[in-house]
Amino acid sequence: MKRQRKQTKTGESLSGQMAWNQSEQAALRRLRTPREIQSFVDDLTYSVDNFTRSARGALALKRAHCFDGALVAAAALEFHGERPLLLDLRAVRDEDHVLAVYKRGKHFGAIAKSKFSGLRFREAVYLSVRELALSYFEHYFNFAKQKTLREFSVPLDLAKVTSVDWRYSLEPVDVLADTLDALPHTDILTPEMARSLSRVDDNMFRAGAGRWTSRKG
């Protein structure tokens, strides 16, 4: 799901208090491991809305794209005492992608909502954020079979974000896109490397894109 900046009201009524209600707590309590969180996020209906819901909004409506799916995952991680971290992946000729990052010891892993099979879960086996981001490179392509991932951000600790209520807001939280954009990003390729990239072969394309023919998510 490419990040959207348009501030669009959902027009949907959600129960809004500044803490998780009993139903939300019950749902989050069951998500004890990153793998369980990933399965939960996978089961949410894929959203084609051009705005981002808070974690509460996505939980209530059982619908998410990559950005609000990452917020659900971050909320579940935080509920169980972990840091709610987001990582921004930037692409060319393609949509950007947002991951929820978790750590096990010194190693990084990720949880993500996507219709592309290779852009979802990562086990915590990567020693750096760069290693984690690079694990998505071969799986990150557009429908012209071009490899499109170019940059990754430093992790954003949502626990320190005060400009928007990403947990409980009843309104879209698209302002987080600006926060992500403002983070330092690191190039993955040199210009020479980018010019020499091969196209994705048919087997990888079918495995990654499946039946989808538009919108990465």
Image (tube, rainbow, N blue to C red):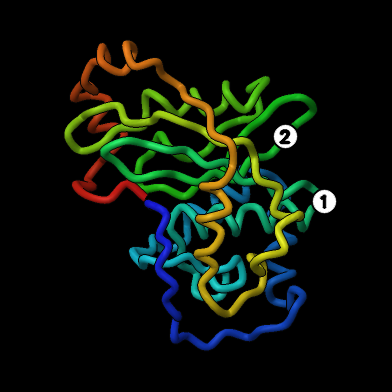
- Nearest the viewer among 158 and 110 is 158
In the rendered image, which residue does mark 2 sit on?
Answer: 103
Question: Which residue does the image show at 72% across and 69% down from the upper left?
Answer: 26
Hey, which quadrant is residue 163 in on the image?
Answer: bottom right
Question: Which residue does the image show at 46% across and 62% down from the upper left?
Answer: 64
Residue 95 in the image: state x and y as whole percent.
Answer: 34, 45
- Nearest the viewer among 43 and 180 is 180
Q: Helix, strand or loop at disc 2?
A: strand
Q: Which disc number belongs to residue 81?
A: 1
Q: Is residue 134 left or right of residue 195?
A: right
Residue 97 in the image: state x and y as whole percent.
Answer: 44, 44
Hey, what amino acid is under mark 1? Gly
Residue 40 in the image: state x and y as whole percent.
Answer: 56, 55
Q: Are marks 2 and 1 in contact (CB under 8 Å)?
A: no
Q: Helix, strand or loop at disc 1?
A: loop
For the image, the number of numbered tags is 2
Q: Is residue 215 left or right of residue 15?
A: left
Q: Which disc number belongs to residue 90?
A: none
Spatial CA distance of label 2 from label 1 is: 12 Å
Residue 215 in the image: state x and y as whole percent.
Answer: 27, 50
Hey, what amino acid is under mark 2? Lys
